[in-house]
Image: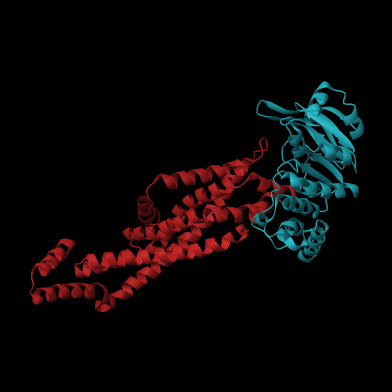
């Protein structure tokens, strides 16, 4: 049932003055709507899908942020070493981090999901978790670059002031540099989170049980794609709008120290 | 107190400090002057290893701090530093700015540090700013806070890197007054500055640097009254 079909029906209704035609159009509309969302309590399938989508997003976000912070700190620490005092171990870890970022950013997300699901974890049946893990590893590379940008953009005087007071490198990072960098990168991090939330739809290709998988199962039952897909799109949109609103609140709170 | 031997620093092929030998005694107030690019800030920053010397050695209270095995954080806890651009932490209140380092380095408990911060703020007449953020302060206030932030670590030596150069002329006086008070209490100080009046009044020794070398040094009255080197005479004729 495509849009053209609905359009033809709708045009017929508009051209004809016959109330019976209009009634037929509304009937088709409501039957499709009923089949897509209400019949057999299908709304529960969407709801479970949304739950899984949010759960996968949360897991992937945690993995992504942890990986991202680690990689960013290693790479920044490596780049900010005092010349002539290169640490060999740090150099090796930095190399691993660069390979990771290069591979993840250099290959399509879809390919990564397929490789994880069908090659590396081909014997696993927990498709959703494999998908979450893949998304987390993917997100980590992008988060790492966002955080690195934030750390490097901060006035070097802040690091110097911390160090001149006798704080160590990691204490200075923890108390002085990272909190300020976090405020600066929050908009980019919010962006990355939104991308992550929407990219969870891709794990359905390896059988992850999220929202789009639910919608596709229903399409296969009812042979109508319009309502399930547009319905899913609206759900994603609402989720993203809620998140953007929360992000705005957080940003206003972090701006507290800017007031004069 | 600080013994500098053959200190050399180059950035790439550019030689900034050229074999500097210098000894700073406890209680001295050494004022470093010179044209911009003469290496005076780099010299100061080498003293607490914010810049790593290319060669040469620096000994602080009998400990060679240029030794790669030296615990540089422990050394820096005993040397306060004040920067041209204040470098207060904008994400923290003034009180937190002052107490962060003493608490994190376990020099004081949070309660002790809070008391110390209150006492230090009272000393610079900024008690009421304890819960303000740096963005709410004027330049002179920020620099006074930066000075007491360094003092909270109870340093044995204070390094000042052009502390008044970023200030409105109006605010220079209040910062210099705090520094003078500190000098009167017997703090050992190394000050890079363009304030000749301060050098004359507070300094016990003036170093004139140019081209990465200390060209001339003397007790301030003799230094300003009878400079010997032609380069010093030329410089002083322009700034005085």
Count of marks, rendered view: 0
What residue lies at 48% left-to-right and 60% top-to-bottom? A61
Residue B71 visible from this viewpoint: no
What residue lies at 88% left-to-right and 35% top-to-bottom? B205
Q: Nearest the camera: B158 or A125?
A: B158
- Please provide percent x and percent y for residue A40: 25, 78
What residue lies at 68% left-to-right and 26% top-to-bottom? B14
Asked if B5 appears above or below A156 in the picture, the reply is: above
**Picture quadrant of residue B125:** bottom right
Asked if A109 appears above or below B12 in the picture, the reply is: below
**Picture quadrant of residue B165:** top right
Write down which chain is painted red. Answer: A
The N terminus of chain A - image quarter = bottom left
Q: Nearest the camera: B55 or A92?
A: B55
A62 left or right of A53 in image: right
Write down which chain is painted cyan. Answer: B
Asked if B116 appears above or below B184 in the picture, the reply is: below
- Please provide percent x and percent y for residue B79: 80, 46
The C terminus of chain A - image quarter = bottom right
- Please provide percent x and percent y for residue A225: 22, 65
């Amino acid at each position: 049932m495509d849009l053209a079909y609905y359009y033809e029906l709708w045009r017929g209704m508009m051209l004809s003055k016959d109330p019976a035609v209009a009634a037929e159009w509304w009937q088709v509309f409501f039957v499709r709507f009923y089949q897509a969302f209400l019949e057999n309590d299908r709304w529960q399938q969407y709801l479970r899908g949304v739950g899984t989508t949010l759960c996968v997003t949360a897991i992937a976000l945690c993995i992504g942020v942890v990986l991202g912070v680690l990689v960013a700190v290693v790479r920044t620490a490596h780049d900010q070493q005092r010349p002539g005092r290169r640490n060999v171990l740090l150099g090796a870890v930095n190399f691993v981090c660069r390979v990771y970022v290069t591979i993840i950013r250099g290959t399509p997300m879809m390919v990564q999901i397929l490789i994880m699901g069908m090659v590396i974890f081909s014997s696993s049946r927990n498709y959703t978790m494999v998908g979450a893990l893949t998304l987390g590893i993917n997100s980590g590379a992008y988060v790492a670059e966002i955080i690195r940008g934030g750390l490097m953009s901060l006035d070097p005087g802040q690091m110097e002031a911390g160090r001149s007071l006798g704080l160590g490198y990691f204490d200075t990072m923890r108390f002085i540099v990272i909190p300020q960098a976090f405020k600066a990168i929050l908009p980019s991090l919010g962006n990355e989170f939104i991308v992550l939330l929407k990219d969870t739809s891709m794990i359905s290709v390896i059988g992850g049980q999220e929202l789009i998988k639910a919608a596709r199962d229903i399409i296969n039952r009812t042979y109508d794609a319009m309502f399930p897909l547009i319905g899913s799109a609206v759900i994603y949109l609402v989720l993203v709008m809620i998140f953007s609103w929360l992000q705005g609140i957080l940003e206003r709170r972090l701006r507290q120290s800017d007031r004069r | 107190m600080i013994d500098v031997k053959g200190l050399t620093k180059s950035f790439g092929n550019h030689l900034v400090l050229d074999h500097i030998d210098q000894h700073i005694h406890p209680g001295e107030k050494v004022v470093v002057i010179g044209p911009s690019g003469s290496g005076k800030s780099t010299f100061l920053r080498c003293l607490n290893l914010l810049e790593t010397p290319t060669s040469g050695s620096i000994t602080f209270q009998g400990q060679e701090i240029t030794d790669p095995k030296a615990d540089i954080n422990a050394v820096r806890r005993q040397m306060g530093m004040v920067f041209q651009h204040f470098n207060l932490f904008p994400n923290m209140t003034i009180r937190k700015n002052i107490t962060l380092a003493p608490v994190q380095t376990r020099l004081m408990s949070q309660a002790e540090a809070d008391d110390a911060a209150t006492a230090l703020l009272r000393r610079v007449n900024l008690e009421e700013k304890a819960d303000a953020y740096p963005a709410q302060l004027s330049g002179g206030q920020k620099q006074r806070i930066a000075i007491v932030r360094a003092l909270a670590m109870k340093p044995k030596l204070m390094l000042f890197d052009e502390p008044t150069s970023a200030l409105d002329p109006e605010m220079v006086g209040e910062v210099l007054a705090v520094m003078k008070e500190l000098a009167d209490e017997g703090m050992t100080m190394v000050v890079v500055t363009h304030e000749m009046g301060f050098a004359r009044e507070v300094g016990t020794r003036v170093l004139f640097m140019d081209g990465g070398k200390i060209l001339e040094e003397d007790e301030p009255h003799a230094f300003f009254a009878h400079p010997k080197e032609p380069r010093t005479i030329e410089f002083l004729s322009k700034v005085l």
